[in-house]
């Protein structure tokens, strides 16, 4: 998690979506556990390709080439998912929450903090093991662009930080 100090420079991918009067409070990438599936698929494909190359297809070069091309596609899939992870950010500013996603087609979903009526987080079994969770945001019966943010690192700490921004205590001077 990256808590941004006043005056600090946020990542360029995020900075271009901030309004001039906004103060960036929190910026996080999704948890690297989001890459577990693509890594597992790529490794399984590598094991299959090696076994097929070593035992079954030694003398069938055209089939062997197809097997390795298919594994190359899996490796490219992993590289693509890693590149997406590297540019995706969940940002909480003094006024809103943003989820910036996408490498080629950039999608930025946003919800003003004042519109958030309910916020919760869930942690699956794997989320508890690896340290990530899912945020669920609700807004007074409206269909919003930002509803679910998965694979958030440090979900309890981030949940408390965001709740502190949403539910600002009233000043005792106003009485």
Image (spheres, rainbow, N blue to C red):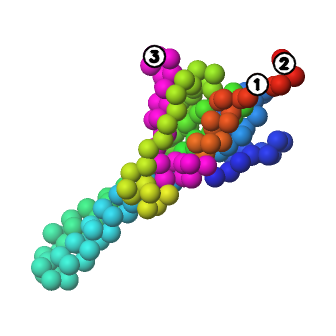
- Do the residues under discs 1 and 2 have CB atoms within 8 angstroms? yes
Which of the image's four quarters has the C terminus?
Answer: top right
Given residues 174 and 66, the one toward you in this image is: 174
Q: For mark 1, give the secondary structure.
A: loop
User: Can you identify the residue that label 1 sits on?
Assistant: 170
Question: Is residue 166 among what the camera can see?
Answer: yes
Identify the residue at horizontal 50%, vertical 17% (top origin).
140
Q: For mark 2, give the secondary structure.
A: helix
State how far apart marks 1 and 2 are (Cα): 8 Å
Looking at the image, residue 96 sits to the left or right of residue 35; the answer is right
Q: Position of residue 97 (x, y in %)?
A: 61, 32
**Disc number at residue 112?**
none
Identify the residue at horizontal 62%, vertical 42% (top origin).
160
Given residues 164 and 149, the one toward you in this image is: 164
Quick one: label 3 or label 1, which is nearer the N terminus? 3
Q: Please, is residue 93 above or below residue 83 in the view? A: above
| Magenta-colored span | 132-157
User: Can you identify the residue that label 3 sits on?
Assistant: 141
Looking at the image, residue 49 sits to the left or right of residue 84; the answer is left
- Do the residues under discs 2 and 3 have CB atoms within 8 angstroms? no
Q: For mark 3, give the secondary structure.
A: loop
* Circle 3 crowding by C-alpha within 10 Å: few under 14, some 14–19, many from 20: few
Q: Position of residue 133 (x, y in %)?
A: 47, 48
State how far apart marks 3 and 1 are (Cα): 26 Å
Q: Please, is residue 37 above or below residue 62 in the view? A: above
User: Can you identify the residue that label 2 sits on?
Assistant: 174
């Amino acid at each position: 998690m990256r808590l941004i100090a006043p005056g600090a420079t946020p990542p360029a991918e995020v900075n271009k979506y901030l309004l001039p009067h906004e103060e960036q409070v929190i910026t996080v990438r999704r948890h690297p556990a989001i890459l577990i599936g693509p890594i597992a698929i790529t490794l399984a494909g590598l094991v299959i390709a090696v076994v097929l190359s070593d035992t079954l297809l030694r003398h069938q070069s055209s089939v062997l080439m197809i097997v390795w091309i298919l594994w190359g596609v899996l490796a490219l899939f992993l590289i693509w998912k890693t590149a997406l992870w590297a540019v995706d950010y969940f940002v909480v500013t003094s006024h809103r929450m943003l989820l910036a996603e996408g490498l080629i087609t950039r999608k930025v979903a946003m919800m003003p903090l004042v519109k958030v009526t309910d916020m919760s987080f869930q942690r699956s079994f794997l989320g508890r093991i690896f340290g990530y969770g899912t945020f669920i945001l609700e807004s007074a019966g409206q269909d919003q662009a930002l509803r679910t943010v998965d694979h958030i690192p440090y979900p309890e700490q981030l949940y408390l930080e965001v709740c502190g921004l949403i539910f600002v205590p009233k000043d005792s001077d106003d009485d």
